[in-house]
């Protein structure tokens, strides 16, 4: 199975992600909040990006240094980092370079797998992630990489890179990237508090429901975009 096939399979899985380790993760989050420490959310770092579409070569993203500087400046050993996936592009193969970067981040870390996170769970745990999941639920909020149809109070997600157009019916979602979460860490309470105002800014594409965002970027999202510092 090549990288594109692996990514397509992961994308299919993440449209209906498994709810993994929610009880354990919820307990951890509640403990950290009770102790007055921070819970941060971030997404879609793509620390190494493919140089050209459909080519295997990757290079450091232009915001590589800024992102890691922001992360390490905020995180302490007592905090939690929830990363909503896509640490690197799927073509990236240098596991040791990625591990050396991730192991330097302090605190408890949760990875919600993205469609580009194609290494096995054991590898991500070796990078310092305490939990590696497709999704989890805390306080009636579901955390996923892709926005999903759901019956929870809120869906905190990544994947759409700050664009505000949805190919699934919009109900209660919020994209962490729209708050600056691709190059920085956003406190969880700020994410939750921002959902109502965020909901007023989104667009739906009902004729495109079920279509993946790869094509939406080309067909729909660009005219409705916001500034995204990760764009090349």
Image: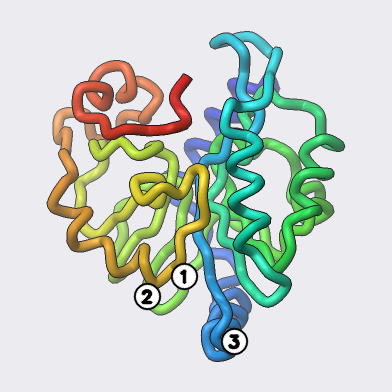
Image vertical order of residue 201 relative to residue 32, above or below: above
Query: Do the CB atoms of the residues marked 2 and 1 lie less than 8 Å apart?
Result: yes
Residue farthest along the bottom direction in this orientation: 34
Location of residue 38 by image quarter:
bottom right
Q: CA distance from mark 3 to mark 2?
A: 17 Å
Image vertical order of residue 59 relative to residue 172, above or below: above
**Residue behind mark 2:** 140
Residue farthest along the right direction in this orientation: 96
Image vertical order of residue 155 relative to residue 180, above or below: below
Q: CA distance from mark 1 to mark 3?
A: 16 Å
Give left or right: position of 149 versus 207: right
Residue 213 percent coordinates (x, y) = 36, 30
- Residue beneath the point at 39% across and 72% down: 189
Give left or right: position of 75 versus 135: right
**Residue behind mark 1:** 137
Badge 2 density bin: few <14, some 14–19, many ≥20, Cα 10 Å: few
Badge 3 density bin: few <14, some 14–19, many ≥20, Cα 10 Å: few
Location of residue 31 by image quarter:
bottom right
Which mark is on residue 81?
none
Nearest to the observer: residue 177 or residue 136: 177
Residue 83 percent coordinates (x, y) = 57, 54
Residue 6 percent coordinates (x, y) = 63, 29
**Residue behind mark 3:** 31
């Amino acid at each position: 199975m090549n990288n594109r096939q692996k990514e397509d399979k992961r994308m299919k899985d993440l449209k209906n992600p498994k709810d993994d380790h929610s009880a354990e993760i919820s307990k951890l989050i509640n403990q950290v909040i009770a102790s007055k420490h921070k819970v941060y959310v971030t997404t879609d770092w793509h620390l190494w990006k493919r140089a050209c579409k459909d080519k295997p070569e990757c290079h450091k993203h232009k915001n590589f240094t800024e992102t890691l500087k922001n992360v390490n400046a905020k995180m302490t050993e007592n905090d939690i980092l929830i990363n909503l996936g896509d640490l690197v592009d799927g073509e990236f193969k240098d596991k040791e370079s990625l591990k050396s970067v991730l192991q330097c981040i302090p605190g408890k870390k949760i990875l919600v797998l993205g469609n580009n996170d194609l290494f096995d769970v054991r590898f991500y745990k070796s990078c310092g992630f305490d939990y590696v999941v497709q999704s989890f639920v805390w306080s009636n909020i579901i955390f996923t990489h892709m926005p999903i149809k759901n019956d929870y109070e809120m869906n905190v997600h990544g994947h759409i890179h700050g664009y505000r157009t949805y190919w699934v019916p919009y109900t209660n979602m919020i994209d962490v990237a729209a708050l600056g979460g691709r190059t920085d860490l956003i406190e969880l309470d700020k994410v939750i508090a921002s959902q109502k105002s965020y909901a007023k800014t989104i667009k739906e594409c009902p004729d495109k429901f079920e279509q993946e965002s790869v094509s939406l970027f080309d067909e729909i999202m660009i005219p409705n975009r916001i500034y995204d510092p990760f764009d090349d």
